[in-house]
Image (cartoon, rainbow, N blue to C red):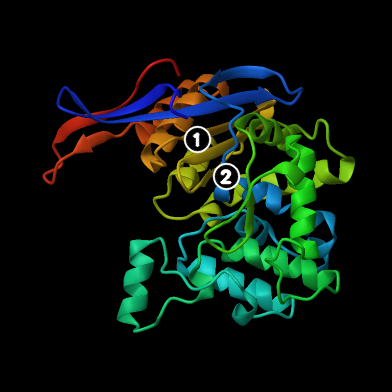
Amino acid sequence: MQNNPLLIEITRGNVAESAHRGAFMVANDQNELVASGGDIEHPIYPRSAVKPLQALPLIESGAADRWRLSDCELALACASHNAEPRHTDSVLAWLKKAGLSERDLACGPQAPISEAARDQLLLQNVCPGRVHHNCSGKHAGFLSTAAHLGEPSVGYLELEHPVQQRVKKVLAEITDNALNEATVGVDGCGAPVFGMSLRGLALAMARYGTGTGVSGPRAQAAARFYRAMVREPYMVAGTGRWCTRAMQITGERLAVKGGAEGVYCAIVPGQRIGIALKIDDGGSRAAEALMGLLLIRYAGLGSDQSAKLEKLSLPAILNAEGKEVGATRPAGEV
């Protein structure tokens, strides 16, 4: 990581006030390198950026059909949501369909990401619950799959539980990473997180978008999740969030998903590519800026979409009066 290139700078006046190094990989579905920067082989924890892959067993197992899950609910399975009312109400309704409740969620309570949603809870004198955790949709997916297959809900986050063994198998197969040898951590929501390379993660996203190199049922599952994400971008994150706004700008052309500590992934079926990146210092605004630049260059966007995405991804730095005092800009070769 120490040798990764400088990719994004945040300026104030003419001075680069913060500088962000990192690595990125753009791969096609034939496992060919389209573009890269930095160390793409060094294992990283993909965090929530990998949720669309973790969700695949929900459809592959038949659970999604049994519980008649909508695009809204499938998008939530891939989401790091704001815990706005539509998010939490949808998760609770989904759990009820599967004979489950908020008590079954093992993600723990978390204050909503959305400031407005947090304020609403305070005004109502309500403590944040498990459903407010940004990963509650992913956990509803884990639990629904276990309920469909007659597996215990207790312990579903343990690495040896069938739920996590299925996830591990999917991740290993679609990324071409040998996860039996991977370093295993625990994500913020309690789920196992596996160390994997940006090369493997980018390949997985390319395969996810086209179905190349995966089985027919998996390709169909990935296509169904992709449609859900691009049709319900609000459910993937929420009001004001970068990935929701990026998908709203680009329509059904691409899906993007962020993760903690500066990780981002993109699925671009029309160009047959996947993108994965990691900002070394974990900065989210640098990750969003870099992803925006890579999408503008490689996603085949029209000029209007590119202009809107550039404005979203490289925002001006404003002072309290709204005066422009700095910029977000690329640094080095992107």
Residue 67, visible in the rendered structure: no
Q: Residue at x 56, y 50 (%)?
A: 48
Residue 177 located left or right of residue 322: right
Front disc: 2 or 1: 2
Q: How far apart, in angstroms, are the residues tagged by discs 2 and 1?
A: 9 Å
Q: Residue at x 33, y 63 (%)?
A: 115
Within the image, what quadrant is residue 265 found in?
Answer: top right
Q: Which residue is mark 2?
A: 45
Lower position in the chain sequence, tag 2 or tag 1: 2
Q: Nearer the viewer, residue 166 or 101?
A: 166
Within the image, what quadrant is residue 32 found in?
Answer: top right
Q: Residue at x 37, y 76 (%)?
A: 121
In this rendering, the count of numbered labels is 2
**Whether label 2 touches label 1, CB < 8 Å:** no
Quarter containing the C terminus: top left
Which amino acid type is marked by label 2? Answer: Tyr
Which amino acid type is marked by label 1? Answer: Lys
Give the x, y percent position of residue 92: 60, 75
Q: Residue furthest right?
A: 216
| Secondary structure of the residue carrying numbered label 1 | strand
Give the x, y percent position of residue 80: 53, 56
Residue 234 located left or right of residue 31: left
Residue 31 vertical position relative to residue 99 in the rendered view, above or below:
above
Residue 218, visible in the rendered structure: yes
Q: Which residue is mark 1?
A: 278
Give the x, y percent position of residue 5: 42, 21
Within the image, what quadrant is residue 36 found in?
Answer: top right
Q: Residue furthest bottom?
A: 125
Residue 168 located left or right of residue 48: right
Q: Residue furthest top?
A: 333
Residue 324 located left or right of residue 70: left
| Secondary structure of the residue carrying numbered label 2 | loop
